[in-house]
Amino acid sequence: MRKEWFSFVAITRKKMQRKSKEPVTHRLAMKAASLNWPAEKQKIVNRLKREERKQVKLKEHCKKLNDVQKNTNEKNKPDKKA
């Protein structure tokens, strides 16, 4: 989360510099970013949860496909008669 915080501060700093047309210190940007951070943090947490759910769903889907593929391969094999 630390990386996301500093990334958010950098974005906030750029916005502030565009708005004020003057250089903005990192410390000042941190103060401004802290006001909007809770909402941004929630977005990040939700995105991570969503990606995790997608990964689980994808694994389940791949597992089902492999099971179906194995079943069709077993049915198509000719029986060996000795």
Image: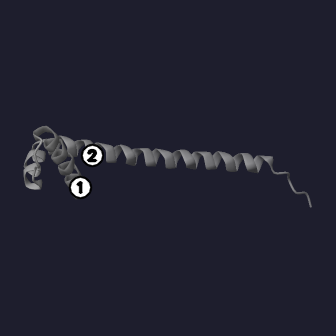
Of the residues shown, which amino acid type is indicated by label 2?
Ile
Q: Is residue 43 left or right of residue 71?
A: left
In the rendering, at what x and y percent does residue 28 appear? Answer: 7, 50
* Contact? badges 2 and 1 (CB < 8 Å): yes
Residue highlighted by disc 1: 1
Q: Nearer the viewer, residue 68 or 43?
A: 43
- Label 1 packing within 10 angstroms: few (<14), some (14-19), many (20+): few
31 displayed left or right of 38: left
Q: Which image quarter: residue 37?
A: top left
Is 31 situated left or right of 8 in this image?
left
Q: Amino acid at mark 1?
A: Met
Pick the front one: 70 or 15: 15
Q: Which label belongs to residue 18?
A: none
- Tell me the residue that label 2 is attached to: 44
Q: Closer to the N terminus: mark 2 or mark 1? A: 1
Extreme residue in the top direction: 19
How far across and down, in percent of the image, does residue 24 sit? 10, 49
